[in-house]
Image: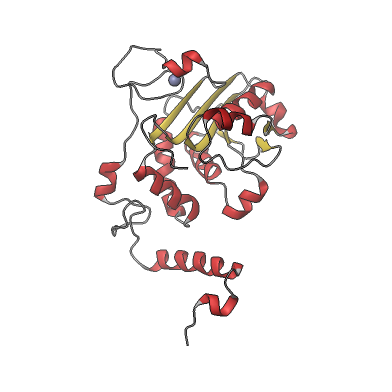
Amino acid sequence: MLRPFTMLFGENAAPTELFRRAGAAALNAILPLSCPVNGEPVAGVGALSARAWEKIRFIDEPFCARCGAPFAVDFGEGAECAACIADPPAFDRARAGVVYDDASHALIVGYKHADRTDLAPLLAGWLARAGAGMVTASSILAPVPLHRRRLFARRFNQSAELAQRLARAKDARFAPLFFERLRATPSQKGMSADQRRRNLAGAIGVRAGSVPLARSAHVIIIDDVMTTGATLNACARAARKAGAATVEALVLARAMKDTPALG
Ligand SMILES: [Zn+2]
């Protein structure tokens, strides 16, 4: 007889979550996969439906030479956006694959929280596209660190997984333990740019064992989403302090001024 998990384990039992995850993984393995953006059936593993593809907005030039924010018109080579001129970021430049909107949000959340690791090749490809001309064999790809407790809850660091794939493709160095969280920070959801900056002050450092690697290096910080850039800036400051020569950032998706905060 089938009984609800709550009857078997109690209302808040941890096994329920384990069963849910195991069930989702098993279903994905035996049934045609659904599109992570709109749920439509798709033919192959890690694929998007045609309608979802239409919704994904890839970021191409013209954009700010520094932070990669798309421009509506071309201001010429090397032009920077007003935000970068007013308050220059700690990184030399940042690039993003796609606009962070409802469609890419669904995709990233599916990848992060719903066992859709089958999406990794697709997403790593988008990262590689955005990082063309940035990633070389002498680059060090360093994912934004998750705090230990959060890493355990999510089971894996999705930025590290993407960084590893990209490093392999470009023959670059993958340094998963380059950065470390020096203390746990509250979730930044709903925080203003200023609040995020204060939330992260002194929270990220270069791990002592990675300092020799950082010296005079070309470090590329890898993250999934860039909202205000506060996390990337905190990492960039830490890399510079450790002696990195060039510090850049590569993210899967970036929020736009006109997009509501999705978290
Ligand atoms: Zn900019």
Q: Residue furthest bottom?
A: 1
- Residue 116 relative to residue 187: left or right: left
* Count of numbered badges drawn on the protein: 0
Residue 159, above or below 49 = above
Residue at the image point whose x is 63% and y is 24% from the top: 237
Q: How is the image coloured?
A: secondary structure
Residue 223, above or below 50 = above
- Residue 115 relative to residue 46: left or right: right
Q: Residue furthest right?
A: 208
Residue at the image point whose x is 33% and y is 64% from the top: 32
Q: Position of residue 210 (x, y in %)?
A: 70, 32
Depth check: give the residue in front, 90 or 82.
82
Depth check: give the residue in front, 47 or 186.
186
- Residue 197 relative to residue 180: left or right: left
Residue at the image point whose x is 45% and y is 65% from the top: 24
Q: Position of residue 164 (x, y in %)?
A: 54, 41
Depth check: give the residue in front, 43 or 183.
183
Answer whether residue 220 is visible to the viewer in this image. no
Q: Position of residue 163 (x, y in %)?
A: 52, 39
Image quarter for ligand 1: top left
Residue 138, above or below 35 = above
Q: Position of residue 95 (x, y in %)?
A: 44, 28
Depth check: give the residue in front, 22 or 124.
22
Quarter location, residue 75:
top left
Residue at the image point whose x is 44% and y is 55% from the top: 116
Answer whether residue 182 is visible to the viewer in this image. yes
